[in-house]
Image (cartoon, helix red, strand yellow):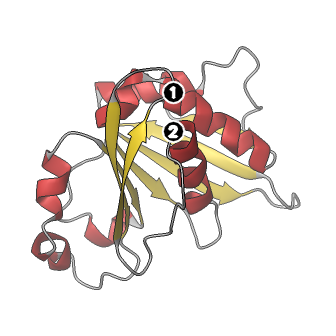
Amino acid sequence: MPPLRLRVPNEAALAALAERLAQSDAIENASIELQGDLGAGKTTFVRHLLRALGVTGRIKSPTYAVVESYRAQRPQGDRAVDVWHFDYYRLSDPREWEDAGFRDLYASPGLKLAEWPERVAAVAPRPDCVLRLSPVEAAEDARCLEATAHTPTGERLLAALGADPAPPSPC
C-alpha cells in the first residue's frame, strides 16, 4: 500500500483523524511510530487518540519518564485496551531500550505508540505503521500527515485514516 499523505489544516482536523484511527479494531494491538521534529504535533496526536480510545484523566507526555501506560475502555466496545506511550527522545544509546525491558512490553498485547523511534531503531521491532507529522509552510497550524504501513495491521490502520468520504486534501 502506498503511503497516505493528508493535509491537516488545524488541531480539530488532527483530532478527527485520531478518532478515525481509534474506530479501527486494528488499533488494539498495533505498534505505531510517530515521527517529526519538535513541535510537529506528535504528542498532541497521541492525546487525541487516547481520548478517542476512552482514556480519561490526565494524559502526560512521557518525555522524562520514557513511557506512560494507560488502560483504555473503548467507547464502541466492551474490551479494555492496554496502551503504552513511549518517548525515546532522552535515550542516548539503543541498549537503554533493552535494559528498560521494553522488549517485554512490545511482546505483550496492547497498543504501542512511540515518539522519537529513530533513537531505538536498531533494537525495536518494526512498527505496523509510521505516522510522520510535519508543518506546512505558510500555514500556521496546518500539518502534513504521511502514513506508511509495514504490515497488514498497518494497512488496516491506513484504510481507517483514509476512510472519510471527504478526506482532507493531500499535502
Q: Residue at x 54, y 61 (%)?
A: 58
The residue labelled by disc 2 is: 54
Residue 75: mark: 1
Q: Residue at x 21, y 59 (%)?
A: 124
Q: Residue at x 50, y 67 (%)?
A: 60
Q: Report the amino acid beneath label 2.
A: Gly
Task: Say whether marks 2 and 1 touch (CB < 8 Å).
Answer: yes
Report the Cα–Cα distance between label 2 and label 1. Answer: 6 Å
Compare marks 2 and 1 and give the one earlier in the sequence: 2
Is residue 30 visible in the rendered image? The answer is no
Residue 90: % across, % down:
37, 83
Q: Is residue 11 left or right of residue 113?
A: right
Res 4 quadrant in image: top right
- Quick one: quadrant of the N terminus? top left
Give the answer, above or below, for where 26 lies relative to 135. above
Residue 84: % across, % down:
33, 54
Residue 61: % across, % down:
50, 69
